[in-house]
């Protein structure tokens, strides 16, 4: 009797890729020495195979997808292990055994005890191997996960979704008040969360692959209701807050559900690529969004930082300098609140071009086409802007370019696992703060200079301001869209 050949998960992935690419099934079956019905069985279960490989729940060399009895415990333990890897925390067998027993107690598995046999089976199921190495080195796995992921898993998603329905999101830290003459504090140093970063926020950007759609920015600040938000009923961005101004698993889950609602309303199915970070956790009950976790510090992550995020920051820093120069030339007090920063970010985000977005994806190894129009010219205006600022008396450090100025806060932390005390503080500071921003918390660092509170303009004052704007625009060469916008504004008022 001919012995049935066992195929590893890695080989099954290759078989699925070959079938999807259009190769003949008979040739594929012959290459791997399996029968046609075995190949059909693999294709029938391809979702399970891809899910197992993508989530790194099984060693790719493993040949069976048999799962454990305590699946919730294993999922919790593997998630903890992944977080430890992200934070470069060394993990060994005894640590895993202690953590497994801890999770078992928390999950109510009173009959569970982590034996050597159970630990060996767990390590085998997930492909974990602990080698003797220096204390500072982290535990390693037997597979080159990033390479396998990019070669096998990602193409599967790109085949199933059009570029317009493939999104990538990423966080970046921003010192929203930092003017050029403040930069000497950071030049040549690692910018970290602390006294140097009191006016920091985290900005989350998201774009699709063909550059046709940018997700609304998510801004994460420190105060749920900063003073400048008082009586504000709507913002041009999504806004969340916690004491660290970081992305957390709670904020991530809420935002994913909000995006899921958005795409449901559009009757779209999309995939969102995110980096494997502690704050990026699995989100249940998503109907239109499929989350795919890419390896940390991937080529896509690096390309997006150097492309889309850099473009946004350069534009924001340019607006910041122009605002300061206008105040100097107009002999007015310079004030920048968090509300001002949020509105400026929204304006700058609208100016990031599809060409910049597609170029970032291409730098990461994707092959996308777009029509270049040369609109993204922040680098070309670098010299003129700096010269103008210096002429107005702005202290711009010698040799500091606009791009360097924009990148000085790139190393700010954007997510971390909070301590129990930080979690309690965060819950206390965000409780009972839903709906309209009321501005009853401690003032932001930027809001403390506001001085006397300004009353909201009346309806007549708003109409008068609109009339002034209309008179100005009549003397300019403006297109039909601006006329329509003015009409929309008047109807709204």
Image (spheres, rainbow, N blue to C red):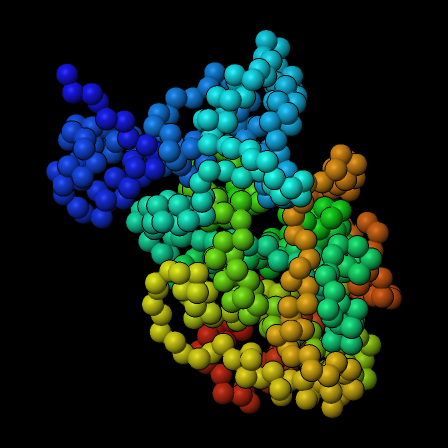
Number of numbered discs on residues: 0
Quadrant of residue 398 within the rendered picture: bottom right
Q: Is residue 187 above or below residue 392?
A: above
Quadrant in which the N terminus is drawn: top left
Q: Which image quadrant for residue 359?
A: bottom left
How far across and how far down the image is residue 222, in percent? Answer: 74, 51
Q: Which residue: 65% across, 62% down? A: 410
Residue at the spot 22% in from the left edge and 48% down from the top edge: 21
User: For this view, does 213 lie left or right of residue 436?
Assistant: left
Nearest the viewer among 130 and 274 is 130
Residue closer to the observer: 440 or 298 = 298
Question: Is residue 488 visible to us here?
Answer: no
Give x and y (percent) for residue 457. 73, 67
Does 395 appear above or below 110? below
**Image quadrant occupied by the C terminus:** bottom right
Residue pushed farthest front?
132
Give the quarter of the image for residue 389. bottom right
Report the residue that reaches farthest toward the right. Answer: 451
Residue appearing at x 60%, y 13% in the figure: 113
- Residue at 69 percent across and 82 percent down: it is 399
């Amino acid at each position: 009797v001919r012995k049935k050949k066992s195929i590893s998960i890695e080989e099954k992935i290759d078989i699925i890729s070959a079938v999807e690419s259009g190769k003949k099934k008979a040739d594929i079956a012959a290459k791997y020495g399996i029968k046609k019905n075995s190949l059909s069985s693999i294709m029938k279960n391809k979702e399970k195979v891809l899910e197992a490989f993508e989530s790194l729940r099984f060693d790719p060399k493993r040949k069976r997808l048999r799962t454990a009895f305590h699946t919730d415990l294993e999922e919790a333990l593997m998630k903890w292990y992944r977080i430890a890897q992200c934070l470069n925390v060394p993990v060994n067998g005894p640590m895993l055994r202690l953590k497994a027993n801890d999770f078992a107690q928390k999950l109510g598995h009173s009959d569970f005890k982590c034996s050597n046999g159970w630990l060996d089976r767990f390590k085998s199921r997930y492909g974990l191997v602990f080698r003797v190495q220096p204390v500072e080195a982290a535990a390693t796995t037997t597979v080159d996960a990033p390479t396998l992921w990019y070669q096998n898993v990602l193409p599967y998603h790109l085949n199933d979704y059009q570029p317009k329905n493939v999104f990538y999101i990423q966080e970046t830290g921003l010192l929203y008040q930092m003017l050029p003459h403040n930069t000497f504090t950071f030049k040549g140093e690692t910018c970290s969360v602390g006294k140097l970063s009191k006016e920091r926020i985290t900005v989350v950007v998201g774009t699709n692959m063909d550059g046709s759609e940018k997700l609304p920015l998510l801004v994460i600040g420190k105060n749920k209701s900063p003073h400048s938000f008082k009586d504000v009923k709507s913002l041009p961005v999504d806004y969340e807050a916690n004491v660290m101004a970081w992305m957390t698993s709670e904020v991530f889950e809420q935002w994913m559900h909000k995006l899921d609602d958005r795409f449901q309303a559009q009757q779209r199915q999309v995939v969102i690529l995110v980096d494997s970070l502690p704050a990026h956790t699995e989100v249940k009950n998503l109907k239109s969004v499929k989350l795919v976790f890419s390896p940390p510090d991937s080529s896509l992550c690096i390309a997006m930082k150097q492309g889309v995020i850099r473009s946004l920051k350069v534009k924001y820093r340019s607006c910041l300098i122009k605002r300061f120069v206008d105040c100097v030339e107009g002999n007015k007090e310079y004030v920048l609140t968090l509300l001002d920063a949020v509105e400026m970010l929204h304006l700058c985000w609208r100016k990031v071009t599809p060409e910049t977005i597609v170029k970032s994806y291409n730098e990461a190894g994707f092959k996308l086409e777009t029509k270049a129009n040369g609109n993204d010219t922040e680098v070309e205006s670098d010299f003129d802007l700096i010269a103008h600022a210096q002429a107005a008396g702005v202290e711009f450090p010698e040799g500091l370019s606009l791009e360097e100025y924009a990148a000085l806060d790139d190393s700010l932390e954007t997510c971390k696992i909070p301590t129990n005390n930080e979690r309690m503080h965060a819950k206390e500071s965000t409780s009972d703060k839903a709906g309209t921003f009321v501005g009853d918390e401690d003032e932001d660092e930027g809001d403390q200079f506001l001085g006397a509170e300004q009353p909201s303009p009346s309806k007549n004052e708003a109409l008068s301001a609109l009339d002034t704007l209309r008179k100005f625009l009549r003397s300019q060469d403006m297109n039909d869209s601006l006329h329509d916008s003015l009409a929309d504004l008047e109807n709204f008022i």
